[in-house]
């Protein structure tokens, strides 16, 4: 019986080649999208899950209530928190403090050197986190403050081997020697934390004693809870720990499982929510919708062309086949189709995966592990069942007496069901079109908005080696290089920034904890960045401005100061500064948030980055000259620079990836929908061929025939647009709520998307309608 059914399926595939190809292309395209998204979602859910103690490993965050409307959750915590938790809280098995540095540092051994990302950690780091040591003892590698633990790749770069490396010295920043006490395996690709070496946190205690003050926050704190520990009870115990040390009631501690931090980064109403998980959910929904659209094509074409198979059903029922047998046959046909489509989809995924990785920034691989095999089988079965259930139930329900007498006709319910499925397809397609357009326009807006400073053609690189001791000399020589318009130095990049709540001014409310962003700068930085001074003046070499400060407009408003120039503020510890100017507001953070209060202080000794503006059109040759100059001035360090506008764009990398992927997925969803529409239009033209022949004999024009065949589909697409546009509006309003500065939702975004869907449908149906209108009526009528 199985062989018989397979033979019938094979014959049907050969007999109805167009339907087979449309279903194959539609299903395989839908399954390709689904598999790509599955690989991405699977990877997202497994980030940081490789740690052996994952279930008991938690990160401590600080919840800062600056005002009734300003709450900030940060992973910056007091430097003494880890050792306090380990010593005083019985639920804690171990705790470790970690200080991250995003900048690369110079490591060297004799004439070999490499730039690497490092961190300072407590001695028990390798007891909490599973970064296996190739060499060294996890209990001892960080006991000595002069020790360094390096990655396998770093060891190969510096020593050419990982053997017999322990005890050898590595020069850090060409200034201090450290002894290698351990080598760890390269950090896995599914780790959110990337680093190449580790130093002892005791060094931070020596160089920055402020980390020992409970009033300050900076390092991160991680805890390993004991087996069976009550997480909720532990959270309550540490909630007000900072208050017991500082009497600061505005700072509380909250807990989150470490491996959840990657997906859930937003804390509100006492719980973790939002973050990357929103994109995971979004793409999962997109995958389901695209797969549903592909399945709908199969359903529609199978039911629409049921008239070709009704005699088969009638004969089988007449000779004794029951409905269950027929359902299994047609379900088997659908599952076989989905299996063939899945095999083709796997091949397409293998071809497309490198480009998909490039877009998503992942390193996904199509390997036949258990999870993937189970997922593929599950997807094939679900797709086959979804696609084949309605046709199987529909075809198997025919009465043999009726179909063998030739009295079969499509029911009104069947027609409405088919139209309803097409409506669903185009509702999803229109929503995709609107989403792509709005996301694209918002990204374009943030990339071209006037930020209040000029980020174009500005590069920056770290101050290190000789430059650190001779900033002014280096800058003077730098400005002489042809193509360098201006140069200065700053404490950190213009994007992002640290905060302080210790700013005091005359008339300040004791409960006011407004955070201010800080920028230590050198002379000329404001002029170089074209930041406008709207009141007072900028820093000047002709005056003693070492105890002066410049606030932005929002900072002055937050302090509610009238005529601020000449007034003083206290930055804590009796550090009194005079306000000499007010800078026009500029966006130093993402456009997701409003401009925050900030200030500049003249402190060249605390600047860590050189910034230089390059003459437009001469970037390549100027950077080559700058590189040669830097190597001659600072031969022990590599010249690693970045463009400021790249930093700005990086804030919207997720949105940019969403925009690109949405564009591709939208195109594929529309393509699949049009394939179904094309098949239905072809079948409609075939079914009405005799009617078309009669109309042509009676004098109907080709345009009349095209209108006749296109009218119903036009109504369907217009109905789809009417349903989709309000839904897409609500979705886009919610997405744009993530941005404090955003585009207006113009009516033409929605009208244009609806018209685009209509034109695509017209083009798809029009090809078949035009072909039908050109038919010779003699061929249509001679069979009658």
Image: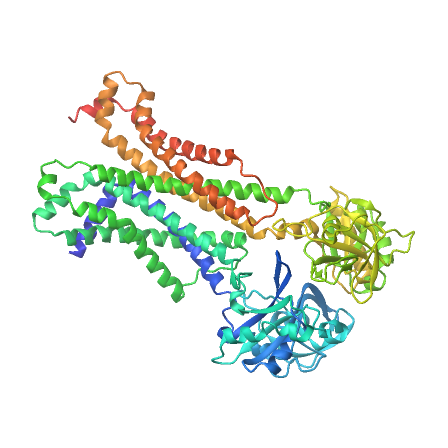
Percent position of residue 550, x then y: 80, 52
Q: Please give left or right for residue 89 compared with residue 664 in the image.
A: right
Would you identify the image quadrant in which residue 205 lies? Answer: bottom right
Judging depth in this view, the residue of 711 and 688 nearest the camera is 711
Instruction: Count up the numbered dots.
Output: 0
Q: Please give left or right for residue 524 compared with residue 129 in the image.
A: right
Q: Please give left or right for residue 736 compared with residue 713 in the image.
A: right
Judging depth in this view, the residue of 636 and 445 nearest the camera is 445
Quarter of the picture containing the N terminus is bottom left
Percent position of residue 478, x then y: 83, 53
Quarter of the picture containing the C terminus is top left
The answer to whether residue 548 is above or below residue 398 is below
In this view, which residue lies farthest toward the top? 699
Coloring applied to the structure: rainbow
Residue 650: tell me if it is visible: yes
Judging depth in this view, the residue of 381 and 597 nearest the camera is 597
Q: Please give left or right for residue 146 compared with residue 783 in the image.
A: right
Percent position of residue 704, x then y: 31, 21
The answer to whether residue 201 is above or below residue 698 is below
Percent position of residue 166, x then y: 66, 81
Would you identify the image quadrant in which residue 266 lies? Answer: bottom right
Residue 130: tell me if it is visible: no
Q: Residue at x 64, y 66 (%)?
A: 250
Q: Residue at x 34, y 36 (%)?
A: 678
């Amino acid at each position: 019986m199985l062989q018989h059914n397979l033979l019938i399926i094979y014959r049907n595939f050969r007999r109805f080649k167009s339907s087979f190809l449309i279903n194959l292309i539609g299903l395989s395209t839908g399954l390709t999208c689904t598999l790509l998204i599955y690989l991405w979602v699977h990877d997202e859910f497994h980030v940081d899950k490789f740690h052996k103690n994952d279930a008991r490993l938690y990160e401590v965050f600080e919840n800062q209530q600056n005002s009734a409307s300003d709450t900030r959750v940060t992973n910056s915590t007091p430097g003494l928190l880890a050792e306090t938790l380990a010593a005083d809280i019985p639920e804690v098995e171990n705790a470790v403090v970690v200080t991250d540095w995003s900048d690369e540092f110079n490591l060297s051994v004799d004439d070999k050197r490499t730039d690497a990302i490092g961190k300072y950690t407590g001695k028990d780091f390798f007891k909490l986190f599973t970064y296996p040591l190739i060499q060294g003892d996890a209990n001892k590698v960080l006991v000595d403050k002069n020790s360094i633990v390096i990655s396998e790749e770093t060891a190969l770069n510096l020593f050419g081997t990982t053997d017999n490396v322990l005890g050898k010295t590595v020069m850090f920043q060409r200034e201090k020697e450290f002894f290698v006490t351990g080598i760890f395996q390269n950090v896995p690709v599914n780790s959110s934390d990337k680093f190449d070496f580790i130093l002892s946190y005791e060094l931070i205690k020596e160089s920055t004693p402020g980390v020992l003050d409970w009033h300050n926050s900076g390092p991160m704190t991680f805890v390993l809870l004991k087996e069976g520990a009550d997480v909720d009870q532990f959270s309550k115990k540490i909630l007000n720990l900072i208050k017991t040390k500082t009497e600061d009631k505005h700072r509380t501690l909250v807990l989150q499982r470490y491996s959840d931090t990657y997906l859930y980064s937003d804390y509100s109403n006492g719980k973790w929510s939002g973050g990357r998980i929103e994109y995971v959910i979004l793409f999962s929904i997109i995958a389901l919708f695209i797969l549903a659209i592909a399945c709908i094509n199969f359903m529609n074409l199978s039911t629409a062309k049921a008239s070709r198979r009704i005699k088969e059903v009638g004969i089988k029922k007449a000779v004794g086949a029951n409905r269950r047998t027929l359902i299994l046959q047609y379900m088997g046909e659908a599952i076989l189709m989905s299996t063939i489509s899945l095999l083709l989809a796997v091949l397409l995924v293998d071809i497309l995966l490198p480009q998909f990785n490039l877009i998503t920034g992942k390193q996904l691989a199509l390997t036949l592990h258990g999870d993937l095999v189970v997922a593929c089988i599950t997807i094939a079965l679900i797709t086959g069942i979804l696609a084949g259930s309605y046709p199987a139930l529909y075809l198997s329900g025919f009465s043999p007496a009726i179909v063998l007498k030739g009295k079969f006709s499509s029911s009104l319910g069947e027609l409405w069901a088919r139209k309803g499925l097409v409506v669903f397809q185009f509702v999803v397609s229109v929503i995709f079109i609107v989403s792509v357009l709005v996301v694209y326009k918002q990204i374009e807006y943030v990339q071209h908005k006037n930020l209040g400073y000029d980020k174009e053609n500005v590069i920056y690189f770290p101050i290190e080696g000789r430059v650190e001791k001779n900033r002014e000399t280096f800058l003077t020589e730098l400005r002489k290089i042809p193509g360098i318009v201006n140069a200065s130095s700053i404490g950190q990049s213009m994007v992002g920034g640290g905060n302080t709540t210790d700013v005091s001014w005359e008339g300040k409310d004791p409960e006011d904890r407004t955070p201010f962003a800080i920028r230590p700068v050198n002379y000329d930085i404001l002029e170089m960045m074209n930041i406008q001074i709207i009141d007072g003046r900028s820093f000047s070499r002709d005056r003693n401005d070492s105890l002066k400060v410049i606030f932005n407009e929002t900072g002055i408003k937050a302090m509610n100061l009238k005529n601020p120039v000449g007034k003083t503020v206290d930055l804590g510890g009796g550090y009194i500064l005079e306000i000499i100017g007010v800078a026009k507001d500029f966006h130093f953070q993402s456009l997701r948030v409003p401009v925050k209060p900030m200030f500049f202080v003249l402190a060249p000794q605390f600047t860590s980055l050189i910034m230089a503006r390059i003459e437009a059109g001469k970037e390549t040759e100027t950077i080559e000259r700058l590189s040669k100059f830097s190597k001659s001035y600072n031969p022990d360090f590599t010249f690693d620079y970045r463009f400021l506008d790249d930093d700005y764009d990086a804030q919207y990398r997720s949105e940019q990836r969403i925009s690109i992927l949405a564009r591709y997925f939208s195109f594929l969803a529309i393509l699949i929908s049009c394939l179904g529409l094309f098949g239905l239009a072809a079948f409609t033209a075939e079914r009405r061929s005799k009617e078309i022949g009669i109309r042509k004999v009676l004098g109907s024009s080709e345009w009349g025939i095209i209108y006749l065949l296109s009218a119903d589909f036009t109504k369907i697409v217009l109905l789809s647009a009417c349903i989709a546009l309000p839904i897409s509006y609500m979705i886009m309003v919610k997405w744009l709520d993530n941005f404090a500065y955003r585009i207006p939702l113009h009516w033409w975004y929605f009208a244009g998307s609806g018209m685009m869907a209509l034109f695509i449908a017209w083009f798809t149906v029009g090809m078949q309608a035009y072909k039908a209108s050109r038919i010779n009526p003699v061929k249509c009528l001679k069979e009658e």
